[in-house]
Each structure stands twice: as C-alpha cells, then as structure tokens.
Image (cartoon, rainbow, N blue to C red):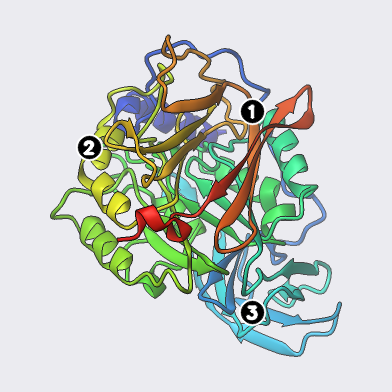
Amino acid sequence: MAVMKGQVLVFALAMAFAGFIGCVVSYDRPPAGHQISTPQPMDLPSTSPQQVHISAVGPDKMRISWITKSFAPALVEYGTSPNNYTNSVTGTSSSYTFLLYISGQINDVVIGPLNPNSVYYYRCSSDSSREFSFKTPPAQLPITFAVVGDLGQTDWTQSTLQHIGQSNYDMLLLPGDLSYADLFQRHWDSFGRLVEPLASQRPWMVTQGNHEIEKIPLLHKTPFTAYNARWRMPFEESGSTSNLYYSFDAAGVHVIMLGSYTDFGPNSDQFKWLQADLGKIDRGKTPWIFAIVHAPWYNTNTAHQGEPEADLMKQYMEELLYKARVDIVFAGHVHAYERFTRVYDGKADNCGPIYITIGDGGNREGLANKYMDPKPEISVFREASFGHAQLEVVNASHAVWMWHRNDDKFSVASDTVWFTSLSSDPACKL
C-alpha cells in the first residue's frame, strides 16, 4: 500500500509538468472508447515470454523482442515447421527504470538470414508452452502495408486490431503514439500484451509521437526511455545514430521514419542523416518512397494547428522530400483521417508527395471532429472516424489505398484510390 501511495504521489507531481510532455490540448474532444487493460495471464510463469513483437532488420533478418518478469535466456529457436527448430540465436537483455517502476527483462534477438514470403515458427527463452509464427515480407512487389496511427488501448483499439488481423498484410507502419502510457509504465506492459497476437506475426515498424516523450523536469530528464528500450528499430543499418529516425527497404519501397520530437533543424544529426539517406536511394530498386512523421505537415483540422513540431519541420525538410520525389507522407497526431492531393509549399503540385493523416487508430482522447470551413482545395477527403488503412503496392507504378472506417464496429472501406509513383511519371523526372 505504501508503494502504491508513493506511485500516486509521484504521478501527481509528474502531471503537474504535463505541459512539458506535449499532451495538453486546446480543443474539446468527443468521448472516446473505454480504456482497457490487458493483464498478464495468471498461469504464465515469470520466465515465459510476453509482449512479443517483431521488426524487420535489413532484407532478410527479423528482430524478435519480448519481456520476461524474471531472468530467462535471451534465446530464439526457430524453423520452418511447428515445434521443429533447426536454428537458434542468442541476443541481448536489458531493463530500465522510470521513477519507481522497474521493467522486466527486455530481450532482443536478430535472426536470419530468412527466406522472403515464408512462414517461420519460433519460441523465446526456450519456453515450449508458447510457440509463435511469423511471415516474412516478399522480396519483390507486390507488398501490402497496414497503416495505423495513435493506437492506444480502448475498445476502439480492439476493433481496429481485429480488422487489421482480418487483412492479408505483410508489414505494419505506425506513425507514433503507441500505448498512451503517459508516464504509467504498466500501461506499456498492457499495450505489449494487447498487440502481441498481431505484432508477433508480422513486422511492426514504428516511430515516436508526443505520448512517447515521457520526460519530466527534475524527476526524469531522459525522454523516450520506455519507447527506446521496448521498441528498438533498425536504425544502425540505415546509418542513423538514433532509434528515433531511420529508414529501411521493403520489396520495392524505401520507407523513411522521421522523428517529430527530436532535433530536425538544418544543423541537426537528423537533417544531415535525411539528406544522406535520400541521396542513396536507387529508384530502380525502390521505385516508391514513403516518409512517416507524427505531427502532420498539412492539416485542415482545427486540432494541433501552429505546432513547431509540424510547422518548423515542414519548413526545414519539405524541400528535401520534394526534390527526392517522395511519393507519400504519412502522419498521425490529429485524431482523424485526412487525405491530401499531391502538394508542395502549400499548393497542389503533381510532383509533390501525397499527404495522409491517419491518427485515428483508437486513442483514449477521442476524435478531432472540427475542420476548417470552407475546405481547402488541396484536401481531398477528411473524416473524424476511428479506423486504419491498407496500402497495396502492386508494381513499380501503381498502388491502391483503402482507408477502413470502424463504423459500428464493422470495417468499412470508405476511401479508396489508386496512386501512381512519381518515378514512373516522366514529368517528374529529375
């Protein structure tokens, strides 16, 4: 009881600094779904793997991440048939503290080389009671992405995850705001258990949002402690020095994950890394380029207007993406869906990126349902509903986008459109 009271006191002090973590809003949100918690099964031993999730590392490797409550070997055994493990790899273990919270043992193991478009079975920490499986992405097009932002842990989140699970996707892209733990670290544990059924089967590639910052003046000065410890992405492989921004290739797509809440000015490491990364892209190998941020650079919702994480980042980096002929820029943060036409410098431009805001995964704060009126011409489709999207990149020139609205708990494809890659447009050749 004394420990619980201490945690409540520390949290109360932390919330006094809420303005520092980017969670303060200036508009009224309608009610969201009910917050849910996913507890650890009572019969699960302390050495059993939980919160299992995977992420792609290079063209033929996969990172397996999981947590155990007590010490267990950071070992993954895997093979191409159930309960027949022909390979084993030992990785690393770590933990972190946040105020009075001490995490379990966080394990990271990179396995491979793996064959593309293949199913592998695996177990973690030699636990024979829990076998998992995943499918590797294809090496060549077509490839299908699930795209969802601002996921959270509500009954709407459950609906969104159910709909994603029913789709035949190869990889999930998440533009920030994962667990909405907001200082309560046990919410990270709950989130890991909530998404494990999907995140253990397909690679989840994520970037951070404002709800991942979790920096408290005087009490906890290091931002992104939980996020960096729990969701390690393949940043080293792309030449990045930070887990907050990185890039990777998937089939014929180059995906750039940017950090809205770390330095992005012209003299920053992120800006210099982005310049170098864009300069290395071979459109013959990856005819498509996607970029992902959290705070949207284009937004006609009244929510989150005038924020430097969006406006300054756009000012500094928009020209880089335009000159590199980036095809699509995904964002979250605004709790609604919006699709723009191809845009550059505030105006329609056939050689600019398509901007899509998809911060409607199921967050606990509700939807942002107030839009600018009249609607600017560059905004093509906008709606405040919970949902997710699927993007099938069919070939080097064409992809089909489908945004699915969670309407009365059913997945409804409400916005469907075909995209053409800029690399296939002679008018946009550099």
Q: Residue at x 40, y 67 (%)?
A: 235
Q: Is residue 125 visible?
A: yes
x, y percent for residue 399: 60, 52
**Furthest residue in direction front, as rendered:** 426
Decide: marks 2, 1 in contact (CB < 8 A)? no
Q: Earlier in the sequence, mark 2 or mark 1?
A: 2
| Badge nearest the viewer, 1 or 3 | 1
**CA separation, marks 2 and 1?**
28 Å
- Residue found 77% across the figure and 49% down from its top: 167
Residue sitting at x 51%, y 57%: 230
Location of mark 3 (residue) = 75
Q: Position of residue 207 (x, y in %)?
A: 45, 51
Q: Earlier in the sequence, mark 1 or mark 3?
A: 3
Dot 2 amino acid type: Leu
Q: Position of residue 402 (x, y in %)?
A: 66, 40
Relative height, residue 149 to residue 286 (above, below): above
Residue at 32%, 58% in the rendered image: 324
Quadrant position of the C terminus in the picture:
bottom left
Q: Whole-Å distance between the Cαs marked 3 and 2?
A: 43 Å
Query: How many C-alpha atoms fall within 10 Å of the one at disc 1: few (<14), some, or many (≥20)?
Result: many
User: Along the horizontal axis of the image, is 46 left or right of 96?
Assistant: right
Residue 76 drawn above or below residue 170: below
The three-letter code of the residue at mark 3 reads Leu
Q: Amino acid at mark 1?
A: Phe
Most foreground residue, 398 or 98: 398
**In the drawing, what numbered circle is on residue 386?**
1
Please state which of the two labelled residues, at mark 3 or mark 2, is closer to the viewer.
2
The correct choice, above or below, for 130 with respect to 17 in the image is below
Q: Which mark is residue 248?
A: none
Residue at mark 2: 312
